């Protein structure tokens, strides 16, 4: 018998500017049986104080809150794993400290999963962007598991997961992978879940800002993402699923290394060419923009100068398009 219906894991690192709004939305949830696990990952700001002050306004939630205040910074994967080991809910979900949720998000997800005897439940989300606009992303009623790194498929914050799926299959986060760690966990759970249901409403607010990962991308982060491909391949092999998902795995590998050619700061076509050469045979079959398939095909066939010309031309067009706006 689980102590809670749901455990929410919230990794926190220097989030004092946003964690208050996040906490308010979490503590105000309509679902009553929630365990909150905050993992402070060596923050040097007042994140902890903000959490405690916000909790003062929700005294009924105090007994349900666990705070792990770690003084050393170990990364988001370690924090998620530490939170997971403290979880006692029937289901688990993650929430990022700079985001926030609709007040009935977790009740809606739980009712969908519990009512349909499902191991997972997924919902749509809003993208809150700096200029005040809000975009909506929905999974669609015909949502099915895909080897795709896009948030709707790869994120943990919009997916309720039965904790037994994780514990009984020995699934865990990898401490040295802090970019793509959510996708790595999500895809393994989706592959092993007996049933997954969809709440086709946007319930999570995914907040974008200038400090997002694509604005401070490094080569090391790209390689962490590439490592996810090796981990998924190993997972498929161990679970005798490799033959079933051969094409999907190659498509995933293609996605995981694309930053090495589409982001100027980490542009490395030679490295792109060496990584996952097995995925090159089906480049033109992948669901990707034509320019990306074309430039990838050219690089794979040692025609990098031509590919570079196309990428530079596209960047120039995008620059003048934005400037015109």
Image (cartoon, grey):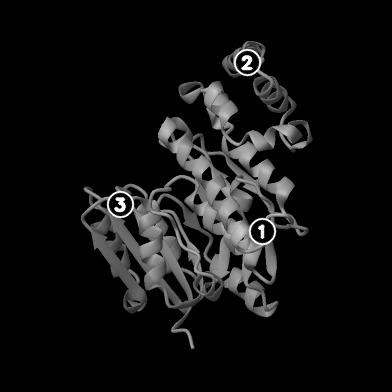
Q: Earlier in the sequence, mark 1 or mark 2?
A: 1
- Res 201 label: 1
Q: Earlier in the sequence, mark 3 or mark 2?
A: 3
- Res 74 label: 3
- Res 8 label: none
Q: Mark 3: which secondary structure?
A: loop
Residue 306: percent from left, percent from top: 67, 11
- Res 304 label: 2
- Label 3: how many Cα within 10 Å (few below 14, some 14–19, many 20+): some
266, above or below 305, in the image = below
Residue 180: percent from left, percent from top: 50, 47
Mark pair 3, 2: CA separation? 38 Å
Q: Is residue 153 visible?
A: yes
Mark pair 1, 2: CA separation? 43 Å
At 59% from the left and 19% from the top, the residue drawn is: 322
Q: Are the two marked residues, 3 and 2, in contact with CB atoms closer than 8 angstroms?
A: no
Query: 131 or 127, which is in the foreground?
Result: 127
At 64% from the left and 33% from the top, the residue drawn is: 277
Q: Is residue 217 visible?
A: no
Q: Earlier in the sequence, mark 1 or mark 3?
A: 3
At 43% from the left and 31% from the top, the residue drawn is: 219
Q: Mark 1: which secondary structure?
A: strand
Residue 135: percent from left, percent from top: 61, 43
Query: 284 or 201, which is in the foreground?
Result: 284
Residue 304: percent from left, percent from top: 62, 15
């Amino acid at each position: 018998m689980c102590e809670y219906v749901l455990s929410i894991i919230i990794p926190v690192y220097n989030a004092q500017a946003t964690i208050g709004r996040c906490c308010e939305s979490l503590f105000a949830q309509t679902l009553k049986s929630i365990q909150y696990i905050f993992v402070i990952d060596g923050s040097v700001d007042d994140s902890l104080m903000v959490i405690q002050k916000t909790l003062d306004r929700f005294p009924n939630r105090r007994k349900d809150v666990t705070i792990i205040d770690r003084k050393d910074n170990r990364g988001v994967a370690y924090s998620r794993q530490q939170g997971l080991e403290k979880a006692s809910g029937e289901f688990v979900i993650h929430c990022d400290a700079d985001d926030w949720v609709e007040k009935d998000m977790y009740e809606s997800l739980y009712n969908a999963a519990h009512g349909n005897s499902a191991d997972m439940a997924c919902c749509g989300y809003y993208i809150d962007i700096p200029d005040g606009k809000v975009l909506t992303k929905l999974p669609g009623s015909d949502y099915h598991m895909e080897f795709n790194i896009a948030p709707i498929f790869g994120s943990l914050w919009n997916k309720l997961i039965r904790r037994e799926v994780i514990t009984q299959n020995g699934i865990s986060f990898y401490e040295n992978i802090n970019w793509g760690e959510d996708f790595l966990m999500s895809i393994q759970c989706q592959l092993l879940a007996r049933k997954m249901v969809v709440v086709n409403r946007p319930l999570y607010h995914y907040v974008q800002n200038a400090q997002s990962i694509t604005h401070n991308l490094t080569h090391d982060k790209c390689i962490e993402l590439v490592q996810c491909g090796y981990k998924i391949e190993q997972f498929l092999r161990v679970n005798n699923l490799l033959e079933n998902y051969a094409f999907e795995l190659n498509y995933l590998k293609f996605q995981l290394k694309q930053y090495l050619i589409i982001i100027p700061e980490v542009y490395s076509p030679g490295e792109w060419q060496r990584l996952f050469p097995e995925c090159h045979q089906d480049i033109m079959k992948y669901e990707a923009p034509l320019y990306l398939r074309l430039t990838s095909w050219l690089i794979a066939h040692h025609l990098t100068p031509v590919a570079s010309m196309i990428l530079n031309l596209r960047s120039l067009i995008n620059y003048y398009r934005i400037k015109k706006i």
